[in-house]
Image (tube, helix red, strand yellow):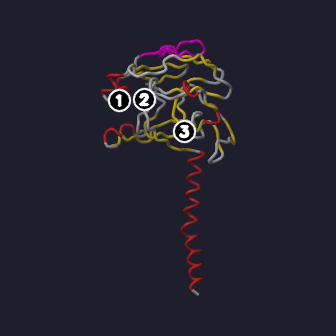
Amino acid sequence: MKIATFRSRARHYWQQEIRPLLILALVLFSVRSSLADWNMVPTGSMKPTILEGDRVYVNKVAYDLKVPFTTCHLAQWADPKRGDIVVFFSPHDGTRLVKRVVGLPGDTVELRNEQLIINGHPVDYTSLTAEVSGQLSPSEQQQSLFATEKLPNHRHAVMAIPSLPAKRTFGPVEVGADHYFMMGDNRDNSFDSRFFGTVERGQIVGKVTDVVMSLDKTDYWLPRLHRFFKPLDADP
């Protein structure tokens, strides 16, 4: 009698408590895997655009639809554009990284003393507004150089840190079919395609569009409220 009662209670607990939670978890993780996700940014390789402690929104259906928990494509309707910020799996070690698309399939990418050259044409640079560079600490502002980089059809902020050893001259390199050349906006402090090569189209997870929330790790992880729900596609 006791065994039958135990089995009855266990069945009831499974049906009423555990199974609904498992189904809900499966649905939520499937959504995160295929439709939308967020990514914590632990490093400063995308400064001054993205800061350490930012949690960014990743639109996983910006370019295609994937099988949940895989990189297999079910459908594709767009390709990354030059200037897009994307999340991808690093060819170096499979780590998820956040970088900017600089070179498209068929492009020739070159860097000469921090000057980006695409298909033989030097990219133009102009001054950067103090509003963007002012988000960094005073010491970072003093030791860094800032500019607005004008890629074809896209403008974004970049920075350089002259005191750091960095790969300021690179290439030229031709980007292969279905591959993309990625760079961090913090040009002297970014592990990107200059080091691990181009990234296959299938390894791109999605497009980063907004900062959802931001915590300042240098100030006891206090929230940076002014960065909450901040779009990242506006001109600097």
* Residue at x 44% of width, y 38% of height: 42
Can you say which quadrant of the picture contains the N terminus? bottom right
**Does the magenta run of residues contain 46?**
no
Sequence-wise, which precedes: disc 3 or disc 1? Answer: 3
Q: Residues within 10 Å of mark 3 (few under 14, many from 20)?
A: few
Q: Cβ–Cβ below 8 Å for labels 3 and 1?
A: no
What is the number of the mark on residue 89? none
Which quadrant of the figure has residue 24? bottom right
| Start-end of magenta stretch | 111-126
Q: Cβ–Cβ below 8 Å for labels 2 and 1?
A: yes
Question: Which label lies toward us, 3 or 2?
Answer: 3
**Secondary structure of the magenta portion, mostly?**
strand
Which quadrant of the figure has residue 109? top right
- The residue beneath circle 2 is 47
The secondary element bearing badge 3 is classed as: loop
What's the amino acid at mark 1? Leu
* Residue at x 57% of width, y 70% of height: 14
- The residue beneath circle 1 is 136
Q: Position of residue 54 (x, y in %)?
A: 42, 38
What's the amino acid at mark 2? Lys
The secondary element bearing badge 1 is classed as: loop
* Residue at x 56% of width, y 80% of height: 6
